[in-house]
Amino acid sequence: MFEDDDNEVGNTPVQLTKREKDHILDELIAVSDVRERVAVLLSSLKPIRITGFFLLMLFALYSVEILIPPKFMNPDWEMVAMNSLLEIIFLPVLGLSLVFWGGNYHRKQIDKFNLWFFSWVALWLGLACFLLVPMATLDSFRILRGYKVETSTKIESQMVKIAEVENQVREARSHKALETVLRRASSTPTPVDRNQELAVIKEGILVAINAQRKSVEETANKAYDQSVVALWKRLVRVAIGFILAGVYLVAIWYHTLWAREQWLVARGKVVG
């Protein structure tokens, strides 16, 4: 008798209030919404990762175009090449980030090797970025030395020409000879006033020659200073850019230990 009563009680359906039913329905809708969001996210992993591989291939192609034909030990070529590489360094930074997007979800067996390989690529590229900083510094000093030699040579060459004209003016003994000197020295020579004394004319020309001598030095030094400022600006840009890129790439390598470990596990080199 009591057993029958227990069975009747156990089979009696639980009566839920309307509030409890609404709460359960809301939870089921929320779970369904989460599942849909996860499905959408997982379906987007493949195109995101393909985009990452595309960016890495693009970087490789651009790098070959920049570095070939190589002209190593040429500081001007090296600085131009480093500037060009800095402009595309975002490609491997972004590409590697997209390749590792989503971690281990929806990966094939071959992906284990790919992730292991690209994890080390991130480290190699990061170290290369750090090594390019002292290289850019040395190249800048070599270019600066070339600027100094070029400026000195330019000033010396023009001073020699000015000195030759000055000597010819001093040696001129007639208005006609002075006109000939001025015609050789300038494509648009100033006419010589034959009614004026030759000594007075020569004195005015010598004053103009001294002014030109000072102008040549000032112009050359100003051009040198502008080149130096532009060179240091470029060096700072290259150094900071490669340091930031190097830090980010090494960080990618550091945070993808899981990718390296899973490949070693797959090969049986790591237990656990």
Image (cartoon, rainbow, N blue to C red):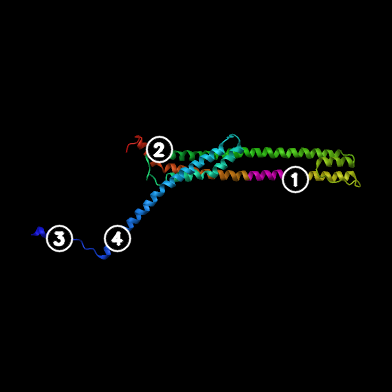
Whether label 4 touches label 1, CB < 8 Å: no
How far across and down, in percent of the image, does residue 201 sit?
87, 45
Mark 1 or 3, nearer chain start? 3
Q: Residues within 10 Å of mark 1 (few under 14, many from 20)?
A: few
Element class at badge 2: helix
- What residue appears at the point 41 percent right and 47 percent down from the top-left corner? 45
Q: CA distance from mark 4 to mark 1?
A: 89 Å
Whether label 1 touches label 3, CB < 8 Å: no
Q: Nearer the viewer, mark 4 or mark 1?
A: 4
Q: Nearer the viewer, residue 183 or 68?
A: 68
Judged from this view, the residue extending furthest toward the bottom is 18
Q: Is residue 218 magenta?
A: yes
Q: Residues within 10 Å of mark 3 (few under 14, many from 20)?
A: few
- Residue 185 appears in view: yes
- Residue 244 appears in view: no
Question: Looking at the picture, does residue 97 appear above or below residue 5?
Answer: above
The residue under label 4 is 25
The residue under label 1 is 215
Q: Residues within 10 Å of mark 2 (few under 14, many from 20)?
A: some
How far across and down, in percent of the image, does residue 203 sit?
85, 44
Instruction: Inspect the image, locate mark 4, and give the three-letter code of the amino acid beneath it.
Output: Leu
Q: Nearer the viewer, mark 2 or mark 4?
A: 4
